[in-house]
Image: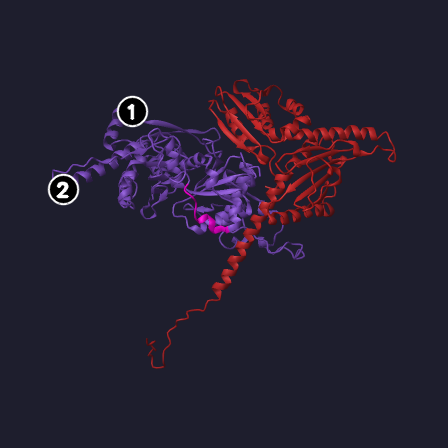
Amino acid sequence: MLLLEYHNLLIHQILTERFNSPTPASIDQVIPDFDGVIYHISTPDTKTKILVSLSIKCYNDLIRYGAQEVLQREYGNYIVEPESGYDFSLLLDLENLPEDQEQKDDLIRRVSLLKRNAMAAPFERAFDTHYTLSAESSKFTSESAPSSSDTEVMAIQYRDEEAIYIKPSHDRVTVIFSTVFREETDRVFGKVFLQEFVDARRRAIQNAPQVLYRTDPPLEIRGLKGVVDTGAGDVGYVTFVLFPRHLKPDRRDEVISHIQTFRDYFHYHIKAAKAYMHSRMRKRVSDFQKYLNRAKPENADKERKTASGRSFRVQN
Amino acid sequence: MSTSQTPAVVMDNGTGYSKLGFAGNDAPSWVFPTAIATKAASGGGSGGGRPAVAQKPSFLTGGAGPSGHLSSKRGTEDLDFFIGDEALNAAKGPGYGIDYPIRHGQIENWDHMERFWQSSIFKYLRVEPEDHYFLLTEPPLNPPESRESTAEIMFESFNCAGLYIAVQAVLALAASWTSSKVQDRSLTGTVIDSGDGVTHVIPVAEGYVIGSSIRSIPIAGRDITYFVQSLLRDRGEPDSSLKTAESIKEEFCYVCPDIVKEFSKYDREPDKFQKYVVDQGAGRKVTVDVGYERFLAPEIFFNPEINSSDFLTPLPEVVDGVIQSSPIDVRKGLYKNIVLSGGSTLYKDFGRRLQRDIRHLVDARIRLSEQRAGTSVRSSGLEVSVITHKRQRYGPWFGGSLLGQTPEFRSYCHTKQEYDEIGPSIVRRFALLGGPGGNA
């Protein structure tokens, strides 16, 4: 498994099972997802009505950047008043499902992508801003193009200490992740890993987005609320520069899904790398143990005899 | 850290199946075989199914050509694996070999287990381990070294926020608190844990396992399946595959109070015989008759001689023996709280029959001692009670879920900071969860 899935496998599984089973059953499960997202899937009133609720840390940020419209577009009629303690709820009525199996599967898929869709809003907005800006700027010659610094930087505080910053401009969309590592080892792994991103672009995949890593806030977000340069370098900033070829409307959804999972992907691979290192260490240890076993003298207590066949006995 | 409200992750990795989920839920989110399918190492590999281990990245060796051994490969081979049901599917195709990292309840292959956990956490549970506390289970008499290795993986690879490792039997006792029969939430009792491979009888006194008195019985789910299969074969049924036998076992079997009476009952009431339809695929369906195996199969717990002559002690006698070998001051509690756990204890009336048989043994012994003591002494009797409850199948997991959601749970865990301070030996001791020290 190289990439993480974008959808929540468990929700997908539960809904597939419920949608295709003739006998309704009650469900009451709390399902966490990455980044402190918590789903609650339950059947509060009757067994045929499934309520899927989502709680996400940065919901207010997302609403500010147009999550409402995106969710409305994706889920439309299924949206209900949010369950208390959660930010957003969907009600699926098993007796009122689309007839077609394909549509059913599509609905399951869409619901399991709830987190992705909620998080997609600021990205979509940034992409749209980019389209309009680039349409405008195409009217100008390259010298007289308006400077891109006047667009708003969208900040999504998706974890307690970490945030995503998105800044659209006429020729690119810049996405910046701030990352915090608690562990010294993780920091080292993270650095190597990010270096690999930079190298990959140089070596093989030329059309990958540009990736920059630094420990002080990049220019784009300097001075923003919540961005403090401590100077200690304990917060890293990863910058992705998405160029127009990444922002084509037909690849947009894929790109958004991809970049959203970056942090989890990053942490997953750091952990996978550590697991891999551990298995190498175990292998090395077992090899060394083999050498040690080989170094044991062979039957050290061989009985020594005289020519006449008598043996010595240790006196004590 | 954003750990303040995240539910704890409860993972019960058994020999056959892994139960994964979150504390507070009433059922595990995922139940799948504890199996991992990895790219089969060429030439058999060394060290018994050890995964490919790279010596040096290929750009350092200058790409010195294929050395045949997987250890020289660089790239993402270490991520090329499947776990659970996907592993079973992948192993059917070419290129993948299957491995079960847990044998007899204990982790044998740490490399595979580490990757099994990695995939469980990131693919199936989808959590960032740094944000969650973890509750893992271990079999009774798990060596402390094994605990330490588990802690090393959980803390060093995954940086999990906190860890608690509980004994399965103790969690099974906690799971029985949901039964209406249980009044006091004590952690004293006898756990009968019967899974697929082996059945354990484990006495637990105030949350601590009495290690010297544990007995295991080589009769469990798989043996019952084989027994059903042999009965089907003897009768010459059209389909006697293991899968058919298993579904018949799960669907139709129950425990009867008396075999002889049950036989005559079947002769009188023909509707006791049932039919099972097997879908052999490609539209072919055959019907299999289901007869005496309905009550004979679980009977091998009570009369093992009908199955094989290797092991002849009936389960009630084993339980009685276990309790008799335990310290005398806890025996009363052990008789009073016999808790069932695991899939092979789910047969209808299993608990009732067990309770009756154990009570017979106990009463007979009391009568004998009364006779020996003379007529003047009368015993007040001894309460024998077998607890059957709804959460039996995933008992240990459910107990973990129950205890993991209590507000005190986190204070019982060892945190990452403590681990960094003290080292792996910290997990040799855990405060007793929900025990006398706590108020759970």
What chain is the purple one? B
Mark 2, residue position? B373
Q: Residues within 10 Å of mark 1 (few under 14, many from 20)?
A: few
Chain hosting mark 1? B
Quarter assignment of residue A264: top right
What chain is the red one? A
- The residue range painted magenta reads B422-432
What residue is at 81 percent from the left and 28 percent from the top?
A: A135
Q: Amino acid at mark 2?
A: Ala
Q: Does residue B45 sit above or below B119 in this rendering?
A: below
Residue lying at the far top of the rendered structure: A96
Q: x, y (%) of residue A89?
A: 57, 23
- Distance from the alpha carbon under mark 1 to that under mark 2: 51 Å
Residue lying at the far bottom of the rendered structure: A308
Callout 1 secondary element = helix
Q: Is residue A56 magenta?
A: no
Q: Amino acid at mark 1?
A: Pro
> Is residue B224 visible in this depiction of the protein?
yes
Callout 2 secondary element = helix
Chain hosting mark 2? B
Q: x, y (%) of residue B231?
A: 33, 36
Q: Does residue B396 sit above or below A114 in this rendering?
A: below
Left or right: residue A223 compared with residue B392: right
On-image quarter of the C terminus of chain B? top left
Q: Are marks 1 and 2 on the same chain?
A: yes
Left or right: residue B82 compared with residue A136: left
